[in-house]
Amino acid sequence: MVTRLYIVRHCQSTGNIAGRFQGRFDAPVSPQGEQQLELLSLRFRNEAIDAVYSSPLTRAYRTAEAINRFHGLPIRVEEGLSEIDVGQLESLLLGEIAVKYPETARAWDETPEACQFPGGESMGQVYERVNGCIDRIIAENQGRTVAVATHGGAIRCLYTRVASGSLAGLRESSVFGNTGVSVLEEENGVLTWAMVNDLSHLPEELSRPPVRFHFGEAAPV
């Protein structure tokens, strides 16, 4: 019995446009993000979906609403799907982080799996939180198809678990574009990626390449 999860990164927000390290900052959806949501809703119009889950942050919840537009299912909000709590780095520009928090910037660039955000979470905590939430969603929906709207940092933690088996693989993990659709399948306790970061529902002008943040390479602001 296969359980299928559509793992979808949120649409573009105004924080994405500005190049901010958003974390839990609840930035509104950008005009381009609104267009992405329209096309995402059409992509899922004829897909069979049994349940919809979302992070509580606006950019993810709006994405869940778009997925759900033609299905009318209740959207279950899960704190475990939230983006990384980056504490004092929340909503700062990348260049600001490199200047104000050089040790954290260096840790993120060189050993992200060991990074501890001042006033926020460690990546180990994020890894356990996100994967624990996904395991529970799978357990609650055996043999069903589920849509999950979440964040880039959260998806990277899930991706590296499946691809490498531990948080150490975070350095090589894929990054995900806005409204990128991935498909995770579970069968007999084994997780596999059937699709990763598919953006075929977007035209080129709306398909912003996914960004891997490197704080140390950012110009001071």
Image (cartoon, helix red, strand yellow):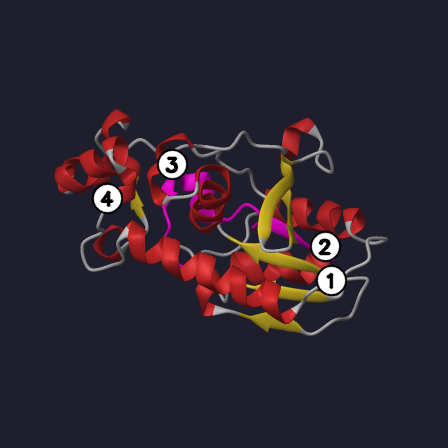
Disc 1 crowd rating (10 Å Cα; few below 14, some 14-19, many 20+) is some
Left or right: 88 in relation to 11: left
User: Which residue is under mark 3?
Assistant: 169
- Type of residue at label 1? Gly
Give the answer, above or below, for where 151 lies relative to 102.
below
User: Which residue is under mark 1?
Assistant: 143
Say if mark 2 contacts mark 1, CB within 8 Å: yes
State the CA–CA distance, disc 2 to disc 1: 5 Å
Lower position in the chain sequence, tag 2 or tag 4: 2
Give the answer, above or below, for where 40 lies relative to 134.
above
Disc 4 crowd rating (10 Å Cα; few below 14, some 14-19, many 20+) is some
User: Which residue is under mark 4?
Assistant: 114
Q: Quadrant for residue 98, please give it.
A: top left
User: Which residue is under mark 2?
Assistant: 2
Whether residue 75 is visible to the viewer of this picture, yes or no, is yes
- Type of residue at label 3? Gly
Report the front residue among 42 and 113: 113
State the CA–CA distance, disc 1 to disc 3: 29 Å
**Which mark lies nearer to you, 3 or 2?**
2
Disc 3 crowd rating (10 Å Cα; few below 14, some 14-19, many 20+) is some
State the CA–CA distance, disc 2 to disc 4: 34 Å
- Coordinates of residue 18 in the picture (x, y in percent): 41, 40
Residue depicted at 67% across the width and 63% down the height:
65
User: Does the magenta portion include 20?
Assistant: yes
- Type of residue at label 4? Ala
Lower position in the chain sequence, tag 1 or tag 3: 1
Lower position in the chain sequence, tag 2 or tag 1: 2
Lower position in the chain sequence, tag 3 or tag 4: 4
Report the front residue among 123 and 75: 123
Tell me the element at label 4: helix
